[in-house]
Amino acid sequence: MRNLLHANFSRLFHSGAFRAALAAEFAYALFIIGVTFYSIYIKEGGQFGLEEPLLFAFGIAGMIPVPMLIQAPFLSVYLGTEFSEGTIRNKLVTGRSKAAVYLSNLLACMTASVLLAVLYLALVGIAAAPTGLPLKMPAGQLLLLACYGLLALAACTALVTMAAMLIRNETKTVIITLSAALFAMFLIGFLTARLGEPEFTAVYDEWGRDAAGMLPNPNYLQPVPRAVCRFLIDLLPTGQCLQISARSVEQFWRMPLLSLSVIAASTAAGLLLFRRKDLK
């Protein structure tokens, strides 16, 4: 296993896909730094805290999961190259088990995902420090959110790794994982909008005057569907990252448990199916 990990990390750091992901993460960090400086010094609207640009490491204000949109194609290309170049077959020929190959790839990919997020945090933290932005939340809470975000990225990595190791085709994997990330983004937006529906709405006449007071909103979710929507948002790594970036986490204790569950379930399913897969 140690030799497999060493080989994976060596190939990772020499991978063009990883360098492209680094460049994309660097560009994203520079964009957030630019927006932060513009808000402070040009618009003079620096009413936000230091935690905001830092937590954008996991998405833009609860709307766009940028890190996952970088991660999905990068990991798909990196793992797909292993199949196209025959690297995985060579590992198996030399006596490595399928389980060891799968787990070593998963660990390498998780490490890469965490490194990308840490790069962002370091760049933004160093750039934002001289601005004197105050930290408007307790430092312990910020650290906790960052750790939860890294765990959510690891859960996303586990899902992408499972897809890449089972699909094998690099192009198909990129399309499927990127499409899944975009679908999850729109799904989370839809579910969040449904949860935000008020229980009562005002009714106005044709002249815009209050005609009937407050009436029950038919779009308001009742307790059971509301709980289901909330669970789906918390379960999906995309939902977790977007909540963290918007600082709107409601149940801190549940998020790491769900991330660990996603990692365990996807890894178990991936291992089971990969062992049965004919790689000839």
Image (cartoon, helix red, strand yellow):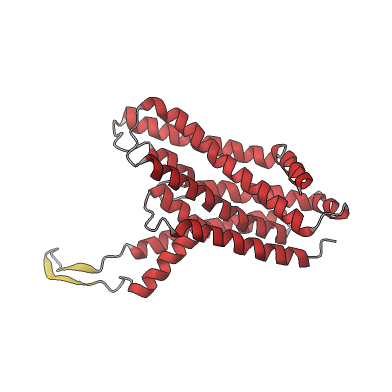
Q: Residue at x 37, y 36 (%)?
A: 50
The one nearer the camera, 273 or 33, is 273
Q: Quadrant of residue 53?
A: top left
User: Which residue appears farthest toward the top when viewing the image?
Assistant: 130
**172 left or right of 62 in image:** right
Image quarter hosting the C terminus: bottom right
Q: In the rendering, at what x and y percent does residue 87 appear?
A: 81, 49
Q: In the rendering, at what x and y percent does residue 38 appear?
A: 37, 31
**171 left or right of 253 in image:** right
Q: Quadrant of residue 15?
A: top right
Q: In the rendering, at what x and y percent does residue 154 appear?
A: 57, 51
Q: Residue at x 63, y 39 (%)?
A: 20
The one nearer the camera, 32 or 223, is 223
Q: In the rendering, at what x and y percent does residue 104 appear?
A: 72, 50
The mark tally for this picture is 0
Q: Does 122 sit above or below residue 112?
A: above
The one nearer the camera, 268 or 36, is 268
Asked if residue 187 shows in the view, the reply is no
Q: Residue at x 55, y 62 (%)?
A: 261
Asked if residue 160 shows in the view, the reply is yes
**138 left or right of 272 in image:** left
Q: Does 2 sit above or below residue 271?
A: above
Q: Residue at x 40, y 42 (%)?
A: 140
